[in-house]
Amino acid sequence: MKLIDRFVSRELLVNVLFAVAILSLVLVVGNIFRKLLPLLVNHDVPMEYLITFIAYVLPFSLIFTIPWGLLTAICSCSDGSPRTTN
């Protein structure tokens, strides 16, 4: 594997992981506030219920965030390439 291939794949992988993590966090927190807000206000949510809810919502959010993260990473990597070659 050439050096440029390793550089591009490492940059792409880091950007994909960062984008998927941020997008998943946003979607999961949005679902928590939308579905559990009345229970959170009354302090009636046990920690086990919250963790179980996150475990159920996370796979659904990954359906959307993996393609979005890949698209974001590709756009980010292809945008930075001309600047680094100068």
Image (cartoon, rainbow, N blue to C red):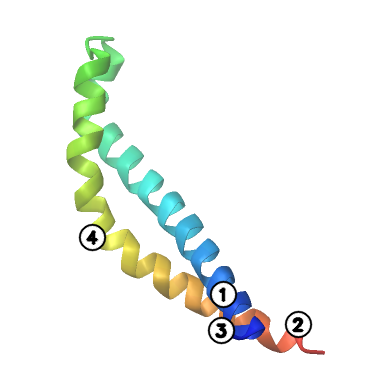
Question: As displayed, is residue 19 above or below residue 47?
Answer: below
- Can you say which quadrant of the picture contains the C terminus? bottom right
Residue type at numbered disc 4: Ile
- Disc 2 target residue: 84
- Disc 1 target residue: 76
Q: Is residue 5 left or right of residue 41?
A: right
- Disc 4 target residue: 63
Residue type at numbered disc 3: Met
Q: Are marks 2 and 4 in contact (CB under 8 Å)?
A: no
The residue shown at (26%, 40%) is: 31
Q: Are marks 2 and 1 in contact (CB under 8 Å)?
A: no
Q: Residues within 10 Å of mark 1 (few under 14, many from 20)?
A: some
Label whose residue precedes the other's in the sequence (2 or 1): 1
Q: Is 37 in front, or is 55?
A: 55
Q: Quadrant of residue 45?
A: top left
Q: Is residue 13 left or right of residue 7?
A: left
- Can you say which quadrant of the picture contains the N terminus? bottom right
The residue shown at (32%, 47%) is: 27
- In x, y percent, where is residue 52? 19, 28
